Amino acid sequence: MNREELKKILPHRDNMLLLDSAERSDDEAIGSLYIKGDEWFLKGHFPDAPVVPGVILCEIMAQSACVLLEDSIGEDKLPFYTGMNNIKFKSPVHPGDTFETHCRIVRSKGPFYFAEGSGYVGDRLCVKGEFSFAIVDKKDK
């Protein structure tokens, strides 16, 4: 799915929609973002040696995982991060890289979903970890 199709699932807009595309393959979501070099999060991180911040890599993984929650997220619902565990940063992501995520939901309980994911540039593992979400009503935000 492209950015317009992603907007039907994800509430993120403008600079915070951090996926160019995403696909579902069985129980896995695969997301992709090409890092152009002019992104807001690279301004100052770091001058003359830009690196995508780790928290942004985690956000990209979370947005990718939310593709798997398409049936639970609608116009009246929002996915909220509730936790991150065992996050490991293995290799930096730079302008010119295409960052690809592989995420899956490992369990759910009520409005909570628990996922694991990893992010790559080519075959190079850049980040991996576990994270969780709650799907909440927009009015309760």
Image (cartoon, grey):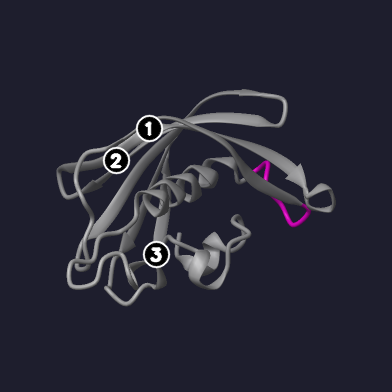
Q: Position of residue 123 (x, y in %)?
A: 15, 43
Disc on res. 127: 2
Q: Position of residue 128 (x, y in %)?
A: 32, 35
Residue 18: say if magenta: no
* As drawn, 109 above or below 119: above
Label 1 crowd bin: few (<14), some (14–19), many (20+), radius 10 Å: some
Q: Position of residue 124 (x, y in %)?
A: 15, 43
Give SS at disc 2: strand
Q: What's the residue type where badge 1 is placed?
A: Gly
Q: What's the residue type where badge 3 is placed?
A: Asp
Distance, label 3 to label 2, CA atoms, is: 19 Å
Q: Nearer the viewer, residue 94 or 102?
A: 94
Label 3 crowd bin: few (<14), some (14–19), many (20+), radius 10 Å: some
Q: Which residue is mark 3?
A: 20
Q: Earlier in the sequence, mark 3 or mark 1?
A: 3
- In this figure, what is the number of numbered marks? 3
Q: Which residues are drawn in magenta?
A: 71-76
Q: Which residue is mark 1?
A: 129
